[in-house]
């Protein structure tokens, strides 16, 4: 029976029994398919070069995360051909007339272990829920200004960790050193940015300086909470020291720890094996995730801007209500006598006296509106800013990967190419033996450097894959934000409504029944005011 195929497709009847046995050992009883991760483990068991493994994976259809029976057979045939030293191409499948070869993968019964491996053993997968991340720690950052005379000397922060049950005092410069070292240690992770540092020139009572200091306090709080909830950062000695060390020089203590531990690539035991855990289509996955997260970030920036405007309007409403009440009070405080032209039946005098009392009610309304503005700022805008800080740290990470690791790798390859050409020229022309040996030594050094850069590049992709998962873990925070928004609006309208309702009967008491307002809002029909015709 011939095994010849069209376009590299495999007929089930043309495969050896071994193929069917492998399928039975690996297939899922639920959908009779092979999980893509299981096939990747099978590929690694074939002990083929990684480049060949990638070549085979690209020719096997696993678009939905799984392989059909025929896709597995195709993969097994390509593995077998590759083990024979042949290039695994579709042409081999088309021209195969002697029967498909048997791959060297061991007994089918032993391959069942590939399916039984727990997903938790996969170091690439991040299995943290949003609730688990948020419960890791909650850190508060409070402002403790120190003054020298009337001018601001420096600002100190009291930082309290719920996890460590401790409070420490930190300056902005402490945060700056911690951030710098964290970025050096975890260059391939999402390290949130610090708020900008600015020389403070105004006095403490300056409104602009107060707003800047408060904004920076909030931003530092978001920064340290994102760091304290990161699966890796939260267990690192740098963070634990920053949150708990109460000595006089935390900056030198942090530098000492970094010198001892080094960067993550040097201290991670699995860093050099990162390539083995990466999916074949990692670049495509990265590009798709990056674009999706970019779109999400753009939308949330717009949402945050609208939420900020709503909070600002609530504050402005508070100012307007207070001013409204003050004007009523000013009217009520006017003791001028009524002119003779005033109608004898005019009730302005008692009404004027009543207006002053109403200013107290409008002050209460102003206070409620101000509370609403603070709620919208604290419960909604601040959570949106936290989420946007996370998304910005992901964007910064992508840029570091593309402009840093990849760029350095490309430069190293270009330098290696130049050195190889120099070596070829030196070999063709008579030169001193010492200079040739020096050039060869430099080439070996450059080859080692390139190998290290390649390992770092794959480790960077490995980390980037994990950090992308972390971003998607945070996406359900949208429901938390919307819940806070709805709750704040319900509470705010309820509190304001209570004050307005309390004000209605007071108007009747103050002005008398003849000047009282209607007991119920005007209906659409009552809303039309009819003026009497002049006679």
Image (tube, rainbow, N blue to C red):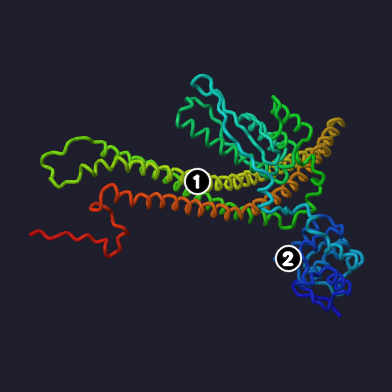
- Disc assigned to residue 375: 1
Give the quadrant of the N terminus.
bottom right
Residue at image location 17% in from the left, 59% down from the top:
531
Q: Find numbered disc 2 in the image and state the secondary structure of the residue it sits on.
A: loop
Q: How many angstroms separate mark 2 from mark 1 (CA)?
A: 49 Å
The one of 244 and 202 positioned closer to us in this rendering = 244
Q: Height in image: 375 above or below 36?
A: above
Between 203 and 244, the one nearer to me in the picture: 244
Q: In the picture, residue 33 is in which quadrant?
A: bottom right
Q: In which quarter of the image is residue 228?
A: top right
Q: Identify the mark nearer the N-term, 2 or 1.
A: 2
Q: In this view, does 308 lie to the left or right of 195?
A: left
Which residue lies under the disc numbered 2? 62
Q: Residue furthest right?
A: 107
From the viewer's perspective, is 471 left or right of 117?
left
Element under disc 1: helix
**148 is higher (above) or lower (below) than 347:** above
**10 Å crowding of disc 2: few (<14), some (14-19), many (20+):** some
Where residue 245 sits: x, y (%)?
Answer: 71, 31
Residue at the spot x=92%, y=66% of the render? 107
Front residue of 334/287: it is 334
Tell me what residue is drawn at x 46 percent, y 32 percent.
208
Relative to 31, is 196 above or below? above
* Percent of width and height locating residue 465: 70, 51
Confirm or deny contact between disc 2 and disc 1 (CB under 8 A): no
- Lateral position of residue 357 relative to residue 418, left or right: left
- Relative side of 263 to 358, left or right: right
Crowd rating for badge 1 (residues with CA inside 10 Å; few <14, some 14–19, many 20+): many
Whether residue 269 is visible: yes
């Amino acid at each position: 029976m011939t095994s010849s195929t069209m376009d590299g497709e495999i007929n089930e009847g043309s495969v050896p029994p071994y193929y069917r046995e492998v399928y039975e050992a690996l297939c899922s009883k639920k959908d009779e398919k092979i999980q893509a991760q299981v096939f990747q483990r099978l590929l690694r068991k074939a002990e083929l070069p990684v480049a060949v493994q990638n070549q085979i994976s690209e020719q096997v259809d696993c678009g939905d995360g799984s392989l059909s029976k025929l896709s597995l057979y195709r993969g097994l045939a390509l593995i077998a051909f590759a083990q024979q030293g042949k290039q695994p191409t579709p042409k081999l499948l088309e021209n195969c007339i002697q029967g498909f070869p048997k791959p060297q993968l061991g007994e089918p019964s032993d391959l069942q272990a590939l399916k039984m491996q727990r997903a938790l053993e996969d170091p690439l997968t991040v299995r943290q829920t949003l609730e688990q991340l948020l419960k890791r720690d909650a850190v508060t950052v409070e402002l403790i200004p120190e003054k020298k005379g009337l001018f601001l000397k420096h600002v100190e922060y009291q930082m309290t960790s719920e996890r460590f049950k401790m409070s420490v005092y930190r300056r902005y410069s402490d945060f700056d050193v911690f951030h710098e070292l964290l970025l050096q240690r975890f260059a391939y992770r999402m390290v949130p940015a610090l708020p900008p540092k600015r020389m403070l020139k105004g006095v403490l009572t300056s409104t602009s300086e107060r707003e800047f200091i408060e904004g920076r306090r909030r931003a530092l709080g978001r920064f340290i909470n994102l760091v304290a909830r990161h699966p890796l950062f939260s267990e690192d000695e740098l963070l634990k020291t920053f949150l708990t060390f109460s000595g006089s020089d935390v900056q030198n203590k942090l530098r000492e720890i970094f010198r001892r531990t080094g960067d993550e690539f040097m201290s991670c035991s699995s860093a050099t094996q990162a390539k083995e855990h990466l999916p074949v289509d990692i670049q495509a996955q990265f590009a798709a995730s990056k674009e999706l997260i970019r779109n999400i970030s753009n939308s949330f920036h717009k949402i945050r801007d609208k939420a900020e405007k709503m909070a600002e309007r609530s504050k402005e409403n508070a100012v307007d209500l207070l001013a409204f009440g003050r004007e009523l009070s000013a009217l009520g405080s006017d003791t001028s006598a009524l002119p003779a032209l005033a109608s004898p039946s005019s009730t302005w005098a008692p009404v004027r006296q009543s207006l002053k009392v109403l200013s107290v009610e409008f002050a209460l309304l102003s206070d409620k509106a101000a509370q609403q503005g603070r709620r919208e700022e604290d419960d909604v805008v601040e959570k949106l800013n936290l989420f946007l800080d996370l998304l910005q740290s992901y964007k910064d990470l992508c840029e570091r990967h593309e402009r840093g690791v990849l760029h350095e790798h490309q430069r190293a390859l270009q330098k290696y190419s130049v050195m190889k050409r120099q070596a070829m020229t030196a070999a063709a022309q008579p030169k001193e033996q010492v200079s040739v040996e020096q050039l060869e030594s430099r080439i070996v050094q450059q080859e080692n450097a390139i190998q290290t850069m390649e390992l770092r590049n794959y480790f960077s992709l490995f980390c980037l894959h994990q950090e992308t998962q972390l971003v998607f873990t945070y996406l359900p925070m949208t429901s938390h934000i919307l819940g806070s928004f709805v709750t704040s609006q319900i509470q705010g309208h309820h509190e304001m409504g209570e004050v307005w309702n309390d004000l209605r009967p007071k108007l009747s008491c103050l002005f008398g029944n003849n000047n009282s307002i209607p007991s119920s809002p005007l209906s659409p029909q009552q809303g039309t005011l009819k003026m009497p015709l002049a006679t």
